[in-house]
Image (tube, rainbow, N blue to C red):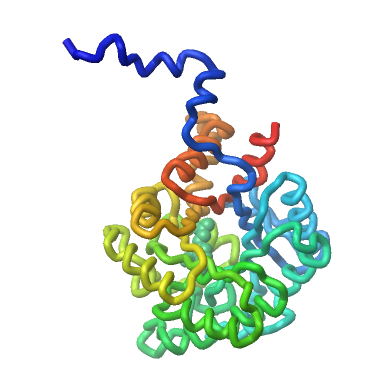
Amino acid sequence: MIASYPQARLRRTRATAWSRALHREVLITPADLIWPLFVTEGTGVEQPIASLPGVSRWSVDGMVARAREAVDLGIPCLALFPNTQAERRSDDGREALNPDNLMCRAIRAIRDACGDAIGILTDVALDPYTTHGQDGLVNHAGYVENDATVEVLVGQSLNQAAAGADIIAPSDMMDGRIGAIRDALEGAGHANVQIMSYAAKYASAFYGPFRDAVGSRGLLKGDKKTYQMDPGNAEEALREVELDLAEGADSVMVKPGLPYLDIAVRVKEAFGVPVFAYQVSGEYAMIEAAVAAGAGERDALVLETLLAFKRAGCSGVLTYHAAHAARLLNR
Ligand code: PBG
């Protein structure tokens, strides 16, 4: 006989909807969401992405329409990624430095249309601009050079900040890039431009559909294991976060999301800083595949996974389901 039974009946507070609502420990709201969007050339263009059913690349005018939609839905921030045309890609990814590249044009158009009503987060890494699909500069041995890459990433960050980016989000996993970018932003008068570092980013099998979306999957030779983290490591994630914070990151990201929820918890507990999770393309595709197979119900799967990030201590989530989730939550 358990001494506390039946005095302690945990089912008591679960018996009715009002009581469950009253006792719910965390909530997910549209304000917790960051919506990743893919921009492509042209006008009036929508290109569905086969491996990300329900997600499309949009031309700049379409991006503006999505931004307005996000404002209406109460989504505070967009994350932009470019699908760079093949002829603008190069070994050194120099298109990343072009002040009129697709990314910069999208930033300016959204800023013109929405002012400060929405935050614009921009990805810093060279893979959408390189012919080899790696995030940095590759030497003759096929190795991604750290320090030379950081120099280009600094230029890319300044280019995005000049176009109006609010949050610079380096996803490249080079060492020392946060400090270098922070210094450069301060020097260029962008003291209030934030850095959200992809601090614990793993060499994951869940990025496939994203690489289709930015057009780098077919180009990528080899893998990204010399710079992205080994999925077996957690202590190392804490070291990555510690360094990025010391170098001036305002917030840190854990990526992918659900398979690395333990990392989010540990980072939050160890540092108490704003932690964001990226529910990446392969996770989105997994949910959609489950729905298509009749194995689950989309709305419930989406809201449950997003709530899990909040329970783990995340301040917010990057998710391709952002608009759908916001619509559900606004009902
Ligand atoms: C590129 C980048 C990737 C993602 C975000 N930025 C892919 C990669 O590292 O190969 C993945 C996001 C997703 O899968 O949704 N540096």
Classify 137 as above or below 306.
Answer: below
Residue at 39% across / 48% down in the picture?
A: 261
For the N terminus, the quadrant is top left
In terms of image quadrants, where is residue 95? Answer: bottom right
Q: How many marks?
A: 0
Note whether residue 170 is visible. yes
Towards the viewer: 166 or 56 = 166
Drawn side of residue 327 relative to residue 176, left or right = right
Across and down, in percent, residue 185 comes to 59, 81
Across and down, in percent, residue 311 comes to 44, 41
Towards the viewer: 331 or 117 = 117
For the C terminus, the quadrant is top right
Towards the viewer: 30 or 56 = 30
Towards the viewer: 311 or 209 = 311
Drawn side of residue 249 relative to residue 264, left or right = right
Across and down, in percent, residue 12 comes to 41, 14
In terms of image quadrants, where is residue 78? Answer: bottom right
